[in-house]
Image: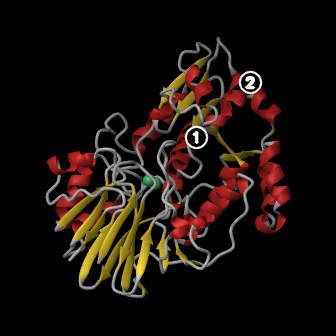
Amino acid sequence: MKIVLHKGSHEIGGTCIQLTTGKTSILLDAGLPLGAESQAPDVAQLTVDAALISHSHQDHYGLMTLLPPQTPIYIGKLGKSLIDATQIFLGKEIQEREYRHFQAWKSFRIGDFTITPYLMDHSAADAYAFLIEAEGKRLLYSGDLRAHGRKGKRFDNLIERPIPDIDLLFLEGTMLHRSNDQFPDETAVENTIFQTIREQKNIAFLLSSSQNIDRIVSAHRACKRTGKLLVIDIYTAWVLEQLRQITQNTPAMDWPEIRVFASHSQDERLKANPEYFGDFRKRLYRHRVKREELHATPGSFLYFGKMSSFRLIEEFKNAATPVSVLYSQWLGYLDGRHSDYFGSDEISRFRSDPAVNFVYAHTSGHAPVADLQRFAAALKPRKLVPMHTEHGEDFSQLFANVVTLNDGEVFDLA
Ligand SMILES: [Zn+2]
Ligand SMILES: [Zn+2]
């Protein structure tokens, strides 16, 4: 089996790996590089029999629509719905092409390859690792993973009953030089949200990704514990609708502690795509909270927002009773080098604003080093290849059997 790591050997994101046997070639992820200076591989020129997408983060699927139109794309059904949701709310078209859905732990074949998807814990729902077997070799692609989210049991299961006989493990290393100690898990995040909103006189905002379902659950639980109402926007409400494909246990807009704030721009998306949304818009309006209501009793609400919510936050700024801003995503976005991230400069300024109670509360979507080491020790791969990392060269100090590949290098797994 020939392996080409097109992208992702020395950076976080943009992952794209090609595996080729005597007669079949597949792609593992077709990610958009996150770094502005990173050149994306020209996937339109790749001749592959199929592409597998691990999860609904841009740095793993962002290039998939550029693949030749006849290339089928294998992806989890929920993951595809979450990508569609992002597209629609960005005002983009959903590309018509052949998508095939696999199921967790059910093997399927693409030519020479037998693939088994393993549902993993990550900050995106419906995230998979793939076991890939061909020509007598067994390869495990970790995707993005962690052990400390609300579905950490999936990681523990793989450690307790490891997949045997792995020839090569592609292991993500996002956290190689990052610590997760301040908030080691989602419960720690939930407790900080709880403590912050319990005392609040003014409204609190929680800034995170609407696709981080664990975080929405934490926000909802904190609201329940304090008798507050959780306010979500239309996009978040739609993301939560998608989760109903797999569970009725995640919060949704019709839960008693949840309200929907309908902004004009998001409502326009609903009106522009009536077939896609069905009766969602009608149902949504039963759970609506208006701007005046937020202003009338601000202390009763936690608003699940994002970086772009800074204008709404401004409306509630008050030196006597500061507005709480719970910053609940990677702190690196506020380092002054992400000005292209809309709202990041404004949110960053809130850190030193006396009218804002700025609180950091975030646990990573990725496993810290100690968990990666437990994972590798359990799986005992004959070769371990770093990916999705800025520090591949440091892997050999932490793991056994490390083989470092460069972008574009052809590696023969014989
Ligand atoms: Zn990623
Ligand atoms: Zn991810």
Q: Is residue 267 above or below residue 16?
A: above
Numbered tag placed on residue 223 in the rendering: 1
| Mark 1 neighbour density, 10 Å: few (under 14) some (14–19) many (20 or more) | many
Q: Helix or strand or loop: what does disc 2 sit on?
A: helix
Residue 325 falls left or right of residue 186: right
Q: Taking 38 as reference, is 381 left or right?
A: left
Rendered image: mark on residue 259: none
Q: Quadrant of residue 282?
A: bottom right
- 398 to 323, vertically: above or below: below
Q: In this rendered view, identify the residue nearer to me: 118 or 279.
A: 118
Could you tell me which residue is drawn at 58 percent across and 21 percent down?
350
Asked whether residue 198 is in view, the answer is: yes
Compare marks 1 and 2 and give the one earlier in the sequence: 1
- Residue type indicated by callout 2: Glu
**What's the residue type where badge 1 is placed?**
Cys
Residue 315 tag number: 2
Residue 218 image point, x, y percent: 50, 45
Mark 1 CB near ligand 2 (8 Å cut):
no
Residue 102 percent across, percent down from the top left: 49, 78
Q: Position of residue 224 (x, y in %)?
A: 57, 43
Q: Of the residues tagged 1 and 2, which is closer to the observer?
A: 2
Give x and y (percent) for residue 291: 80, 34
Is 360 displayed left or right of 202 in the figure? left
The count of marks equals 2
